[in-house]
């Protein structure tokens, strides 16, 4: 028989696809822009002086080494009978080359760091949570990339941060449903519904938990209430159909071709 639908997993596939696309394109974008960015930065550096080019620990080390190389080269070239203007020109060329090399190495290191961050959904969203620890959406997306035990722990921490956000207990209920803990899922979906009593999706989610527990009559009531609020809610009509109740969608519902095909059983 068709699976229950809680209506909360649709964003997960899109996030996976976005993460993979970002991972593939990140290296290419940096590679294309490195040379131009380095040339622009070198021009600015020549006007400001090498001392202003330090960017954190890595930048300081790279530029420091480049300046040392350039000064050393200039000193060696400046011996003998070479005119002062020629010595200065050779020294500036060496400095520019060394700074260019240092900036390219710095940009390559930064590119590698971002590529490693975007390698998986977990590392991507963990980085987002670290940068915005009180935002709910990155925490929910990170929970979807974790195993159920760690996901629940993260979501319960998130519920303490945002106790009035219904998306958090809704996601808890989804995780618990996947673990087969329908009783606890029912409690979580109930909390979400209390925070958003007019939500058709919240009613459908609670009905899905009731269906998993075998409470068909209560589930049907929640599904019919959900469709009274949103007649085109696909998941509610799908779950109602599982109960043997014929509930064809209104003609003005904008369902995808895949949803229509699944609903019609073709």
Image: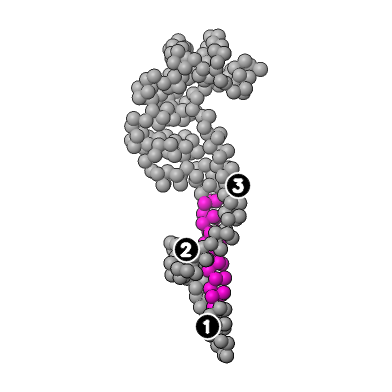
Q: Mark 1 highlights which residue?
A: 75
Q: Quadrant of residue 52?
A: bottom left
Residue in the foreground of this view, choosing between 6 and 76? 76
- On screen, residue 92 above or below 159: below
Residue 140, image x, y percentages: 44, 36
The answer to whether one can see residue 65 in this image is no
Q: Determine the residue positioned at 43% across, 70% down.
A: 51
* Image side of residue 149 versus residue 79, left or right: left
Q: Mark 2 highlights which residue?
A: 58
The quadrant in which the C terminus is found is top right
Residue 23, image x, y percentages: 57, 46
Part of the protein shown in magenta: 91-116
The quadrant in which the N terminus is found is top right
- On screen, residue 115 above or below 38: above
Which badge, 1 or 2, is on the more N-terminal residue? Answer: 2
Residue in the foreground of this view, choosing between 202 and 151? 202
Q: Quadrant of residue 32?
A: bottom right
Q: CA distance from mark 3 to mark 1?
A: 45 Å
Camera-near label (1 vs 2) is 1
Which badge, 2 or 3, is on the more N-terminal residue? Answer: 3
């Amino acid at each position: 028989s068709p699976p229950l639908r809680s209506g909360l997993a649709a964003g997960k596939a899109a996030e996976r696809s976005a993460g993979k696309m970002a991972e593939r394109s990140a290296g290419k974008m940096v590679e294309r822009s490195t040379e131009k960015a380095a040339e622009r930065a070198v021009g600015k550096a020549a006007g400001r002086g090498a001392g202003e080019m330090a960017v954190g620990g890595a930048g300081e080390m790279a530029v420091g080494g480049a300046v040392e190389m350039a000064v050393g080269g200039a000193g060696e070239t400046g011996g003998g009978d070479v005119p002062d203007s020629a010595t200065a020109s050779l020294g500036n060329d060496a400095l520019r080359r060394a700074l260019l090399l240092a900036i390219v190495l710095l940009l390559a290191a930064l590119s590698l760091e971002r590529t490693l961050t975007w390698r998986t959904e977990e590392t991507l969203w963990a980085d987002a949570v670290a940068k915005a620890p009180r935002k709910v959406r990155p925490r929910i997306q990170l929970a979807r990339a974790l195993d159920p035990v760690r996901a629940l722990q993260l979501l319960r921490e998130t519920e303490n941060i945002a106790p009035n956000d219904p998306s958090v207990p809704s996601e808890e209920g989804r995780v618990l449903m996947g673990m087969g803990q329908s009783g606890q899922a029912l409690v979580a979906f109930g909390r979400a519904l209390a925070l958003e009593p007019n939500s058709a999706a919240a009613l459908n989610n609670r009905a899905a938990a009731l269906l998993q527990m075998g409470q068909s009559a209560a589930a049907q009531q929640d599904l019919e209430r959900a469709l009274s609020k949103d007649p085109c809610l696909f998941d509610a009509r799908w779950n109602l159909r599982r109960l043997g109740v014929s509930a064809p969608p209104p003609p003005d519902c904008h369902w995808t071709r895949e949803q229509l095909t699944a609903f019609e059983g073709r």
